[in-house]
Amino acid sequence: MRVTIAAEACLSWDDVVPGARDAADGSNVVLHEFAHQLDQEDGELDGAPLLPPTTLRTWGRVLGVEYERLREEVAADPRSVLDACGATNRPEFFAVATESFFERLLQLEREDPELYQQLKQFHGQNPARRAVPDRPGTPAPPAAPTSS
């Protein structure tokens, strides 16, 4: 599915605040809509943002497999690290995956390592490596070396 849209987003503060209050719930309208903006940089809203030619094949394979898997999971009704909205179409899948990449980072890295890796390369960040220790499900940082 290809949809062309304007390159701007208008967000309601009432929709922004809940996503900002809980940075681990996997729901953040700012991240979601920003992902759509990144997706359409090439003029098409198709779930494939501008990527270096060397990564296009792997991106397409990994996101295609994960999108189809989410569609199957939603049909069977199990819980997923990705919101069910991502099964709607590829643009929604990319936006939902971006939300989980930043908000459910450790769970996404553990459950969908290939998807996490593709998003890590695209976004140029590795949020799981700077996870906050008191965040639910986040491991504590390594202990500081002790002197004897």
Image: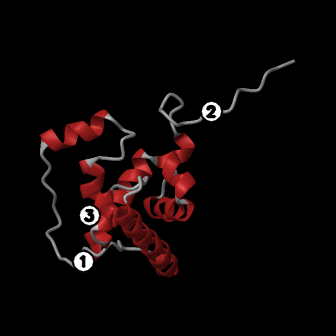
**How far separated are the C-alphas under marks 3 and 1?**
10 Å
The residue tagged 3 is 36
Outermost residue toward the front in this view? 76
The residue tagged 2 is 141
- Residue nearest the observer in this picture, 38 or 111: 111
**How far separated are the C-alphas under marks 2 and 3?**
33 Å
| Among numbered discs 3 and 1, the one appearing first in the sequence | 3
**Residue 26 x, y percent position in the rendering:** 36, 46
Residue 38 in view, yes or no = no
In the image, which disc is placed on residue 44?
1
Q: Identify which residue is drawn at 47% across, 74% down.
A: 65
**Residue 100 x, y percent position in the rendering:** 40, 52
* Residue type at numbered disc 2: Pro
| Among numbered discs 2 and 3, the one appearing first in the sequence | 3
| Among numbered discs 1 and 2, the one appearing first in the sequence | 1
**Residue 69 x, y percent position in the rendering:** 44, 69
* Residue type at numbered disc 3: His
